[in-house]
Amino acid sequence: MKRLIETGLMFGNLTPVRSPVLVERYNRALAHLTGKRTALTDFHIDISGYAPEVGQELGDDLYLNPGGVNRMFILLTPDQKRSPLLNAAFSTSRAILRRFIDANEAELFALTARDAVAGELVNSIFSVSDPARLFDIRQIRIEADTTGGTVAKARDLGAKIDRFMQDEDAWFDDVLIAEMIGLAKQTGDVVRNPVTLSQMSFEQNNFWTAHHGGLYIFRDVENPAVISVGDPATVGDLPIAHTIPITDRNRIAIFLEVNGLVEPIVKARGIDAAAILRQKMEFIVVDAAQEAGIDLTGATRRDLRRLARDHADRLPEAYHGLAALWRWAEAEGPWPRIDGSHPAYFYTLRAADHPDADLINMLLAELAPMDIRQLFICHKELFYRLYRGWGPTKQAYVVDFLVREYQVDKAGARAALFGHDPAMEDPAPPAVSDDMIARVGPWGPVRGR
């Protein structure tokens, strides 16, 4: 993993904490939330305030996320919004923190000038030892204040000011006036410069969780289901109609299609589909080369094309399926029939334009793991886990590729792969036979051809 860290592909964009003032503020917040402190004088934090160095020091990578639910956070600066979220247990957590910081950026800038802001992503449960409890999570509420309680004190001062202004006898209430003066010394002038944080809550209907081997939970779709990465038998009965194992690719394909969650790359607007398919084919060649023990040091695209020609009989069926689709995209071949049972199928898709596009692209990355670029962008937890098992040749190639062709323009790469141009007209809903659904369910049983 050292190569990933050195190139910024792992722990990249973390916020440095180096000054004694910031370290002390961090320690006050850490003690406020957990009762612990760090002896470190130099470390780096993610968007939630988690520091890998502190986790190693404490021997607890979940020191801000005990039990993997109700994640706590420490904000030393609004600039943390640009940092990643490490050890994520839920796919929605970083987006929620980012939206909270964006909505309160001016207030957080003022508050963190003097103190750390500590808080928690609160839901209605404290344990997910029973997988069914995940379905009790409906809404995430953010509770936050400085370690000195500035926001709560400002709220209290505001209430006292209202009472002072409305009560005719308040001018003679020495106790009230003394309390207002005492609070104002801690909060400043809350009339001219209000000290407040927006009370925010977020719906959590469709999400991924790392718990129980990994679960993709889709409740807010026309045909709800759970996709289980681990053994479905280990999660037991869930309060949802269907649980689909990640290995049942045909049922997953139909689930995605009937809910309108994906679109073929070759039919997407505003992208170079042929170039994307060609790149995916090269990634598959890299994977096959690793299996064959071929050295890829310094390999160029021309080298990969030569390897594909020389070892075509050793390439997996996914490569040949993508090659057929690429030839069609280049108007050099007939339309290939690639259904949900074909190994290339999920490599040919991307998320459709809908609010859960990031979640769907994350699922597709898990279903098409040889596409190392999409895997790194959309599912870093899985990328890092798989990276550990790759040989040195593939590791070196992947790092070189991501540094050379992704890091130089992250936003541009994401837009080229996953961005959506405005549609010319509203797309028609997918055609699904009601009587067929009644007989076999919306995504099974279906057999590949």
Image (cartoon, helix red, strand yellow):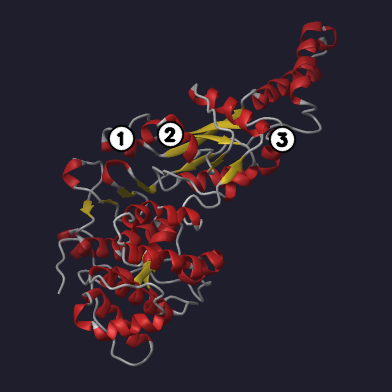
Please say if the residues under marks 2 and 1 sit with CB atoms less than 8 Å apart. Answer: no
First in sequence: mark 2 or mark 3?
2
From the image, tell me which residue sits under label 2: 65
Mark 2 belongs to which amino acid? Asn
First in sequence: mark 2 or mark 1?
2
Please say if the residues under marks 1 and 3 sit with CB atoms less than 8 Å apart. Answer: no
First in sequence: mark 1 or mark 3?
3
- What is the CA distance from the residue labelled 2 to the residue labelled 3? 26 Å
- What is the CA distance from the residue labelled 1 to the residue labelled 3? 39 Å
Q: Position of residue 21 (x, y in %)?
A: 68, 31
Residue at x-position 32% and y-position 70%: 347
From the image, tell me which residue sits under label 3: 113
Mark 3 belongs to which amino acid? Ala
Residue 357 can be seen in this image: no
Q: Position of residue 325 (x, y in %)?
A: 31, 82
- Residue 33 is marked as none
Front tag of 2 and 1: 2
